[in-house]
Image: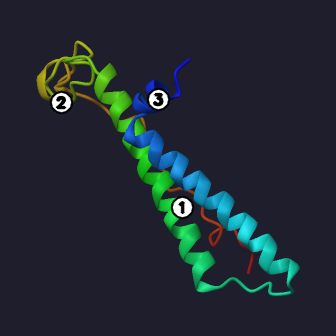
Amino acid sequence: MDILNTLATITPATWLLIAGIVLLVVNIIYGWFRSSRGNIKAGWFTVALALVACVLIGAGTVQAATASTTFTLRPGQFAGRGGGGFNNPANGASSNANATSTASSSPAATPSSSRSR
């Protein structure tokens, strides 16, 4: 297995995920060193490093999810309104013209109405 070919096939989304995880590990190690010296407060550097790591992980995850859905999506798979994706009439029209409600017409009991005064 050639390492250069493997590195060339990694997508940018994967690189963002790897970079975010590496930054979180660096942040944890840096925090251990600071706490061993007695400084347990989080400084601006550690907070910014953690935020950048979270942004990188989030961006990489969204890119990977977007890429996986665009490759597997078939035309008309999620057609939506009027697309006929589920063999429904266009625009969500129902074959039953006189639809009725099955909801109860009595008012619902509320906690304030059931209290004894």
- Residues under labels 1 and 2: Cα distance? 40 Å
The residues tagged by marks 3 and 1 sit, at their Cα atoms, a distance apart of: 26 Å
SS category of the residue bearing label 2? loop
Residue 114 to residue 6: above or below: below
Q: Looking at numbered disc 3 in the image, what kind of residue is underneath it? A: Leu
**Vertical comparison of 41 with 6: above or below:** below
From the image, tell me which residue sits under label 3: 4
Q: Quadrant of the N terminus?
A: top right
**Foreground label between 3 and 1:** 3
Q: How are the colours assigned in the image? A: rainbow
Residue 44 at x, y = what percent?
A: 58, 84
Disc on the earlier residue, 3 or 1: 3
Find out whether the residues at labels 1 and 2 contact each other: C-beta distance under 8 Å. Answer: no
Question: What residue is drawn where x is 41% and y is 36%?
Answer: 65
Q: Is residue 104 visible?
A: no
Q: CA distance from mark 2 to mark 3?
A: 47 Å
- Left or right of 55? Residue 25 is right
Report the amino acid beneath label 2: Arg
Q: Say if mark 2 contacts mark 3, CB within 8 Å.
A: no
Give the SS element for disc 3. Answer: helix
Place residue 29 in its image quadrant. Answer: bottom right
Q: At 52% across and 52% down in the image, what residue appears?
A: 19
Point out which mark residue 53 bears. Answer: 1
Mark 1, Cα crowd under 10 Å, few <14 / some 14-19 / many 20+, is many
Residue corresponding to mark 2: 81
SS at mark 1 in the image: helix
Where is residue 75, by image quadrant? top left
Left or right, residue 111 beside residue 52: right
